[in-house]
Image: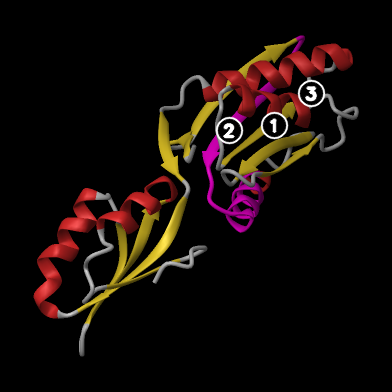
Amino acid sequence: MSEFYTIQKQTEGLYKEKGSKFLAFAYPAQSEDEIKVIQSELRKEYYDARHHCYAWVLGMDDQIWRANDDGEPAHSAGDPILGQIRSFELTNVLVVVIRYFGGTKLGVGGLINAYKEATASALSKARRAMIFETREIVMSFPYDMMSIAERLIADFEIVVHKRDFQLSCEIIGDLKKDSVDEFMEKTSDLYTMKFKISGDDNE
C-alpha cells in the first residue's frame, strides 16, 4: 500500500486548563529542514512561552519521527502529541504545542491530557490530503512518440518535473510505486522508448 495522508494547510487549536493555555499549531512538512524553520519562527513569535513541545512524522513506508517534551516531565508532552498524529493516521506533519503556564501545576496526567486535547483540536480542523510513495521515472523517446508519452503521463498520473526536447525527448517525473509493474507491462512493446525508474532494474 502506498497511499498515505497529510494535511492540506496549517491549522490551529487551543486547550485551556487551570489557567494554562496550550496553543497547538499543525503544519504539513516535507523535510527536517522545513520543520526547523517553522519551529524557529514560532519561537521568535511566542518567545515568552514557557514550553514549545512538539512531534513530527515524515515519510511513508520508512517513516521517521521525533517527539520532544521541551522541559515538561518526561513523556508528558511530546508523546501525547505524537500519539494524536498517529491516531489521525497522518504523515509529513509537524505539531507544535506552546504552553503558557497559568500558575497551577497540572500533574503528569493533566499534562498528558492537555497536550493530547490541544493537538486533537488542531488536527480535527485539518483537511486531509492523500499522498503516495513514488519512484522517479525518466522517459526517453523520439519526437514521433510524443503523443504516446503524453498519454502514459495522463493514464498513470505521472507528476512531471522536467521536460527536455533538444536532440531527443526526455521527461522526468514521479510515478506511483504501486503502478510500476503495470506501467512496465503496458510499455513492454514500446521498443523505441526507454524508461528508467529509480529503485528498479527495468530500463
Label 2 neighbour load within 10 Å: few <14, some 14-19, many 20+: many
Residue displayed at 70% across by 30% down: 82
Residue 186 visible to the viewer:
yes
User: Label 3 is placed on what type of residue?
Assistant: Phe
Label 1 neighbour load within 10 Å: few <14, some 14-19, many 20+: many
The image's mark for residue 25 is 2
Q: Position of residue 199 (x, y in %)?
A: 52, 63
Question: From this viewpoint, which residue is outermost toward the front?
Answer: 189
Task: Indicate which disc, 3 or 2, sits on the residue closer to the N terminus.
Answer: 2
Q: Quadrant of residue 90?
A: top right
- In the rendered structure, the answer to whether residue 147 lies left or right of residue 34 reads left
Location of mark 1 (residue): 98
Q: Which residues are magenta?
A: 18-42
Residue displayed at 42% across by 67% down: 202
Q: What kind of colouring is applied to the model shown?
A: secondary structure
Q: Position of residue 141 (x, y in %)?
A: 22, 77
